[in-house]
């Protein structure tokens, strides 16, 4: 009898334990989803361009047809738009490729609905010419140029403390400088600095953001499309050194970084936590060199 | 050793400067005497002057006789005469003068090293015995045991009696042996044997270095005020300046090559040297150019002045070689044209296409059964077979004209032989091998040693070369800064000079350059220049340029295309000024539309390939030395 009692109590305990585990797992799962949504917007994901196997083949015989098939894989957390892919620098006497340029409208970025990002294939049809005299081979180097536009969003929760000299403020602690490891795009806010100037009962906050290219390609320009502290827009936001349009930074090969300065007056007396968000659009270009090999069928390289 | 000797010679020259003082002292009394006479008795002036002249003359004679006692001075003077004979092609006597200099060198070295003269002569004599009595044989083990053993007795004997003191002079005896080889053309021989690139230093050493005089310079005694010291010092200074100009001003790394193989016939050395001297561009001696530029007061642009003089002297040789007599109007016109060629763009050489490993070439091959030295009863109608190997990888169809010629080496008489295997042939295959048999004419009796020259003239050979260029139109500086390195890296990098025209290493081809400047492969809108030359890449001679053609320039302005049209090419009588023959220079400031305005998406047009085709005749020769000994 005692044994039976003991057995049912053990079963109950096991049941409770299993339920607790299930409950914990369930909670974890729910939290994971929420975090997963955020996780896409970390790091420096970008468009990855690759070739389908044997397209083009390693060596091409004279007077033959071949294909170049590109796989475009959007690993960024944002959609890519106005895409253009061009093949540049092939000597048409040896390799003729048609079309030389192809376009894509949108390539959807990674998200909860599309966790691996969208892939697209572009096909270029090629024809090879004849080798010069009795040459064994011809090496045709070319560039694959990919251009696209995209967006990037940055957000963080900050502590704002206008009373710098208030020792006994029991609120949050404000940090002067923070570093970031990317927002899921080649364009990234990598560093933020906050400078507080006490004015009257409030303060003026100056935010200095370092916006950099952390991808494999080149940034052409960055435009700021939105900047808010809490629910309010910044009073002033401009790229350092910008000339005509203060919200736009024009970049070049040697300068792939811009500094954005935003200002906000606050009248609050006590420290408080709030969100900061920035939105950007940018144009991106990637140029990579590849090779096509035209080889005589009689040639053996050892 | 050479460096330390040069250093000691330089050191000697500084002490030699002090040696000028005695001559001033010895001349001074005569002058003072003469001046005194002039001051006191006017009528005795003539006597005084003649006395002074006599005193000066006596000093000069004493100096000369004193200087001649130094074997180094003899070596310098006779060595220079020997060099002059050599460069003027007086070949017969130079072997004798070289041997005389060889012994003087031994004498000079022993004096310089202050060692026993016979110690120096021992290795020299052993060398001469091996060279002349044993015919410079490579020998076998037995020979070297025997010869080496006896030679060792000569070396070790004195060493035993002198307790090793004789080792130094015996080693010194090897120096004249080295200089004998240098004089006979060791550098030229090495260049030919190992196909070394002829550097500026090598060229200067072959053309302008009197080796025995150099050894004389290194063995000059240090003057201690005795008679002849002034001449020795002056010679030393002149010699050092000359060596510095010839060797150091070329500013190239020293000749240092791995060598293997055996010591060979000195005749081969001499032949190699003569051939290379004939092939090298004959410019003014750089030492002379240097002196003339200094005399002209061109101190600030001395190097430019030397280069200028060298180029002008090369132009002169070119024009004389082209059959123009100095002082004639055609000669002046030729000089002007040569200068224009340089200003317009000069001679353009291409590079070997690394993708074409089989060029169209041919060569004569002598079999081991070739009757090089035969006894014969009549010496008539002798047949000499040789093989002509042709590499025709592009399977071109062309003609070959074969001929042969005998020249008696003693009497210098020549007569034609008969090719009995067919003298006019058509070639089609990829690697045809032809047997070429030359028969001596029936009316000539062969007796003695002859040069048998086989000749093959190839009619209608084709050779092509390509040149790639990229067109960018008009672009901003930013664009150029970004894209020019990318373009150069993708299309004009890699092994070799990929921005130059390239073609198979056939007997000949066209080398050409084109662009805003000839060597910039990225072409912008604006003036462009195209210069082309014919390159003779083989060891034979281009006998005719049948035609040439450029393709890829179809959309260019008519005037430019007209300039590229085939026109008759006058070939030089002989090879000179390197192996390039100037072909044409054309200019234009227009570009076809697609080159001037490349597609915006692409940014640039190209690489575009231009092709130059050459159709030519080429002649190769092979000389074999044959001997026929009549019997009975």
Image (tube, rainbow, N blue to C red):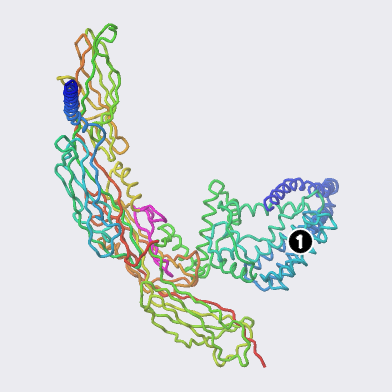
Q: Left or right of B365: which side holds A29?
A: left
Tell me if I can see residue B507 in this picture.
yes
Q: Quadrant of the C terminus of chain A?
A: bottom left
Q: Position of residue B325 (x, y in %)?
A: 52, 70
Residue bearing the label numbered 1: B106
Specify the principal SS of the magenta part: loop
Quick check: B507 above or below A126? below
* Image spot of residue A280 (x, y percent): 19, 31
Residue B619 drawn at (x, y percent): 46, 76
Q: Which chain is disc 1 placed on?
A: B
Residue B506 located within the stretch drawn in magenta: yes
Q: Which residues are magenta?
A: B492-521
Q: Is residue A175 magenta?
A: no
Measured as percent of width and height from the top left, residue A225 is found at 17, 29
Near mark 1 (Cα within 10 A), the count class, few <14, some 14-19 or many ≥20, is many
Q: Residue at x 27, y 19 (%)?
A: A194
**Seen in the image, is A210 located left or right of residue A81?**
right
> Horizontal placement of B628 versus B44: left or right?
left
Dot 1 falls on a residue whose secondary structure is: helix
Quadrant in the picture for the N terminus of chain A: top left
Residue A74 or residue B221, whichever sits in front: A74
- Name of the residue lying farthest toward the front: A1
């Amino acid at each position: 009898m005692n044994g039976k009692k003991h057995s049912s109590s053990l079963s109950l305990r096991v049941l409770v334990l299993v339920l607790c585990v299930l409950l914990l797992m369930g909670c974890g799962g729910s939290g994971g989803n929420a975090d997963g949504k955020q996780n896409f917007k970390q790091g420096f994901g970008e468009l990855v361009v690759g070739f389908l196997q044997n397209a083009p083949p390693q060596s091409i015989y004279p007077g033959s047809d071949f294909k170049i098939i590109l796989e475009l894989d959007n690993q960024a957390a944002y959609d890519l738009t106005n895409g253009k892919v061009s093949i540049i620098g092939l000597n048409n006497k040896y390799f003729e490729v048609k079309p030389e340029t192809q376009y894509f409208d949108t390539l959807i970025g990674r998200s909860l609905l599309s966790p691996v990002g969208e892939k697209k294939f572009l096909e270029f049809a090629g024809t090879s010419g004849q080798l010069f005299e009795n040459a064994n081979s011809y090496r045709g180097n070319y560039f694959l140029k990919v251009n696209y536009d995209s967006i990037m969003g940055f957000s963080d929760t900050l502590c704002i403390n206008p009373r710098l000299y208030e020792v006994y403020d029991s609120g949050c602690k404000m940090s002067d400088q923070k570093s970031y490891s990317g927002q899921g795009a080649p364009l990234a806010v990598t560093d933020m600095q906050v400078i507080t100037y006490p004015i009257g009962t409030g303060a003026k906050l100056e935010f200095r953001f370092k916006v950099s290219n952390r991808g494999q390609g080149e940034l052409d320009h960055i435009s700021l499309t939105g900047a808010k502290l809490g629910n309010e827009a910044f009073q002033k936001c401009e790229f350092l050194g910008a000339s005509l349009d203060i919200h736009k930074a024009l970049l070049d090969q040697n300068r792939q970084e811009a500094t954005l300065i935003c200002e906000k007056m606050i009248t609050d007396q006590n420290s408080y936590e709030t969100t900061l968000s920035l939105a950007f659009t940018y144009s991106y270009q990637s140029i990579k060199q590849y090779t096509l090999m035209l080889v005589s069928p009689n040639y053996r390289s050892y | 050793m050479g460096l330390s000797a040069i250093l000691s010679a330089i050191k000697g020259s500084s002490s030699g400067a002090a040696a000028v003082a005695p001559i001033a002292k010895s001349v001074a009394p005569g002058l003072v005497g003469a001046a005194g006479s002039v001051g006191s008795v006017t009528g005795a002036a003539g006597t005084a002057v003649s006395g002074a002249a006599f005193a000066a003359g006596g000093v000069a004679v004493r100096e000369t006789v004193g200087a001649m006692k130094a074997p180094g001075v003899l070596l310098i003077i006779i060595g220079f005469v020997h060099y002059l004979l050599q460069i003027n092609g007086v070949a017969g006597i130079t072997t004798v003068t070289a041997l005389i200099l060889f012994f003087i060198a031994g004498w000079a070295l022993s004096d310089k090293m202050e060692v026993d003269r016979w110690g120096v002569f021992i290795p020299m004599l052993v060398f001469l015995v091996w060279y002349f009595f044993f015919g410079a044989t490579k020998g076998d083990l037995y020979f070297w045991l025997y010869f080496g053993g006896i030679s060792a007795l000569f070396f070790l004997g004195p060493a035993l009696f002198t307790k090793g003191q004789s080792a130094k002079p015996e080693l010194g005896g090897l120096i004249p042996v080295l200089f004998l080889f240098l004089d006979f053309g060791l550098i030229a021989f090495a260049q030919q044997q190992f196909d070394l690139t002829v550097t500026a230093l090598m060229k200067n050493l072959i053309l302008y270095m009197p080796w025995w005089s150099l050894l004389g310079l290194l063995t000059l005694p240090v003057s201690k005020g005795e008679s002849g010291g002034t001449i020795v010092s002056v010679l030393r200074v002149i010699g050092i300046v000359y060596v510095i100009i010839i060797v150091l001003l070329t500013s190239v790394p020293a000749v240092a090559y791995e060598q293997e193989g055996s010591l060979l016939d000195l005749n081969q050395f001499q032949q190699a040297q003569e051939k290379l001297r004939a092939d090298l561009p004959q410019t003014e001696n750089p030492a002379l150019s240097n002196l003339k530029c200094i005399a002209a007061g061109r101190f600030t642009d001395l190097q430019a002045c030397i280069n200028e003089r060298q180029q002008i002297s090369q132009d002169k040789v070119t024009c004389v070689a082209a059959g123009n007599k100095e002082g004639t109007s055609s000669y002046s016109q030729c000089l002007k044209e040569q200068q224009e060629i340089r200003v317009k763009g000069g001679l353009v050489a291409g590079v070997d296409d690394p993708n074409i490993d089989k060029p169209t070439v041919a060569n004569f091959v002598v079999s081991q059964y070739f009757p090089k030295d035969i006894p014969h009863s009549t010496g008539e109608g002798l047949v000499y077979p040789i093989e002509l190997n042709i590499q025709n990888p592009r399977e071109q169809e062309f003609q070959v004209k074969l001929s042969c010629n005998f020249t008696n080496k003693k009497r210098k008489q020549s007569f034609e032989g008969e090719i009995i295997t067919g003298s006019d042939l058509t070639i089609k295959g990829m690697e045809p091998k032809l047997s070429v048999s030359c028969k001596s004419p029936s009316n000539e009796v062969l007796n003695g040693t002859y040069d048998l020259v086989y000749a093959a003239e190839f009619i209608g050979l084709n050779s092509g070369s390509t040149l790639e260029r990229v067109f960018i139109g008009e672009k901003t500086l930013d664009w150029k800064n970004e894209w020019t390195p990318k373009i150069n890296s993708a299309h004009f990098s890699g092994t070799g000079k990929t921005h130059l025209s390239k073609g198979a290493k056939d007997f000949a081809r066209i080398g050409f350059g084109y662009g805003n400047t000839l060597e910039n492969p990225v072409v912008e809108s604006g003036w462009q220049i195209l210069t082309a030359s014919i390159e003779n890449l083989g060891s034979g001679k281009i006998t005719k340029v049948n035609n040439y053609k450029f393709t890829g320039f179809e959309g260019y302005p008519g005037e430019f295309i007209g300039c590229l049209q085939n026109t008759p090419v006058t070939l030089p009588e002989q090879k000179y000024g390197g192996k390039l023959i100037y072909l044409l220079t054309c200019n234009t400031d227009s570009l076809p539309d697609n080159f001037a305005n490349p597609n915006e998406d692409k940014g640039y047009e190209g690489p575009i390939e231009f092709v130059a085709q050459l159709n030519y005749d080429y002649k190769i020769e092979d000389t074999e030395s044959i001997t026929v000994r009549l019997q009975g």
